[in-house]
Every structure is written in C-alpha cells, then in structure tokens.
Image (cartoon, helix red, strand yellow):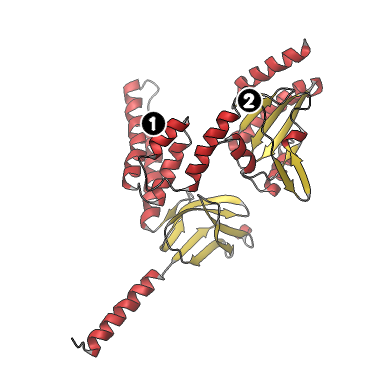
Amino acid sequence: MKRSFAAIGSTFAAAVCCVNALAAGYNVTLPLTDAQNGLKAVIVDYDTSEKLDSAIVADGKAVFSNSITAPVLARILVDGNRAALIILEDGDITVGADGIGAGTTLNDRLGKFNADQQAKLAEFQALPQDASDQQKQKIIDEYNAISTDALALNSDNPFGYYLLIQEAYEWPDIKTFDQKLSQYPALAGYKRFQTLRQGLLNKEETSVGHPYKDFEITFEGETKRLSDYVGKGKYTLVDFWASWCGPCIRETKVLKELWDKYHDKGLDFLGVAVWDEPENTRRAIEQYKLPWPQILNTQNVATDIYGIPAIPCIILFDPQGNIISRDKQDQELVADVDAAMAAVAK
C-alpha cells in the first residue's frame, strides 16, 4: 500500500517528537546561598552511592541537567554534606526548603507524604495534656497509615523503595526480613536490602558473647586495624559514629564522662568514623574535643562487618576482645561500663 509524503512526514514528525520527549531528561535546581558559591554539589544514587551527576554551585544554587534511563532515588551532597533527597526522573525538579524535590510525579508524591506526616505530627503535639489514650492512638494510627497507603501505591518504584527501606531497618531477624521483603518482589533487587540482610547475619555473629571481627582501613598511606586497639589486655569501648549524626554527637557527652572516670583506670577508647567524609570527621573531633584515637574513613567497611544499621553503635570489648555490651546508650551504657570496670577494681 502506498503512503503519501504527507503521511510519511507526519509519522516522521511524530517519531521525532517522541524521541525529543524521551531525550528531554531532567533539570534539577537546588537553592543554596552565595556563601556556598564554588562548592561542589553531587547527586548520588541512594541505593548504591554511585555518583550520577555533579555541578559547581554558582549564583547561590546548584543546577543539574542531564538524562537518566529510569527514575532513581538520590541524595544531593554539597561539599560532602547531605543537602536534599529527590527522585531523579525526567522533568523539572526544584528542591524546597524541606530538602525534598518537587515538580515531577514521584517527587510530588514524596513531598505530599512528607507534608502529611508532618501535619499528623503537629496534630499529635497539639493535643492537650489531658488527651485520652484513645485520642493519641487515633492520630498514631493515622500517621502510620500514611506510610502504609503510600507504599501500596508505590510498591514498584523508587519512592516505594524509600518507604520500605525505612521499615527494613526495624526488621529484627532474618526470618522476619525474608517474610516482609517477599511481599514486595519488585523492590527486592535493591542493593541495600541485600546489605541489610547480610547485616542481620553479621550482627548475630558479633552479638554479646562473640569475639571481635577485625577490619583494616588504609587512609592517607596509613593502615589501621581494629586489632591494633581491641584484645590487648584492656576493656575497650568502641564508638561507631559520624560527624553529621545528631544522636552520635549527643552521646559524646556520655562517652567523655566515661573517659574522665575510667581512662586512667584502664579503660581504652576508640572512635570508628563511618559513612562520613574524613575532613568533616576531623572538624567534629576538634569541635567536640574528643580525646581518644580514631579510625577515619571506614565508610561501610566496619558497619557491614558488624551488621550496624544505624549509629551511634557502641560496643564494649573485654580484655580478650570478646563483646560484652552492644547497642547500649546513656545510662544503660554507663551501667555496663561500671559493671566491667568494677571487676577490674577487685
């Protein structure tokens, strides 16, 4: 069958239009300040930490323009510090004051989810002091339903992955982990789920009563090992932390009090910096006047080996390097250290 030039031209124009639509790519704008001009901004894959794009801050903002084959949950880092969470997808994305992207389908869903949760949190905080348990539970149930409903709607995309990975950090054991993840087959292939699962296995192998597992880090030409500090005949308190971690910084007050109380009585201390830029770690060490030695730039190495899903994680090793306390903070940590050091004093 013959086709007219007009018909062929129409088909060609439609094809070009489709190609241009596919090639449109993304434009991401992150508002910053003029004081940040010249800093490097980087978009990294939330799941794999792979660098996806970069830009230099100019005119008080970072602007990224490129293309991507499929939507990806991503973080934007500025000078190594977390600045935004977005879903990198085709379209014009602008980061709001809340650090969340807006302007495209999945980013708008993420933004609405965040706003809805904040609204419920504000509603809970506004309850009068004499509010009944029933009133409180109603808002808690509504708050939790926001996540449940959003996950049901997004169980096959990066927003759904973000929701599920938050839950996965709370799954306590391998059996629960496998059972829960099996309900979301489209999300099971993400790297972090596999890392978390292996982490649960590693956590079991580094729980109380087990010997330490060694690791080594070479940074700036110097190699340091956990075994340089642990199992040397003294009780050793090891703090896995990061400069950006608020709970980690708050816990340094407790650690410094323990240092003052026990360091001269035979308790050794060690900081292990994880998931952090070494320059930022060093600034925090100086700012908070942390007197104990540090292993810098371990990134995921130490946390993977010890199955640490969240920080701070503080582990107390006995003189032979066996774990006698793990995942304790504040007065629970103090009680464990007091008990160990009481044995030394006898």
Q: Quadrant of residue 185?
A: top left
Q: Earlier in the sequence, mark 1 or mark 2?
A: 1
Question: Looking at the picture, which amino acid does disc 2 mark?
Answer: His
- Residue that label 1 marks: 124
Foreground of the two, 210 or 65: 210
Q: Quadrant of residue 12?
A: bottom left
Give coordinates of residue 272: x percent, y percent. 68, 37
Q: From this view, report whether residue 128 is shown above or below residue 75.
A: above
Which type of secondary structure does the marked residue at label 2 adopt? loop
Q: Callout 1: 10 Å neighbours few (<14), some, many (20+)?
A: some
Work out which residue is located at the far top of the displayed protein and give it.
Answer: 346
Q: Position of residue 151 (x, y in %)?
A: 35, 43
Query: In the figure, is residue 161 to the left or right of 307?
Result: left
Q: Which residue is mark 2?
A: 210
* Residue 102 shows in the view: yes
Q: Residue at x 35, y 46 (%)?
A: 155
Question: In the figure, 93 relative to 100: above or below?
Answer: below
Q: Give the vertical position of 253 relative to 9 (above or below).
A: above
Q: Name which residue type carries label 1.
A: Phe
For residue 261, the mark is none
Residue drawn 39% across the image and 36% down it: 180
Q: Quadrant of the N terminus?
A: bottom left
- State the SS at label 1: helix
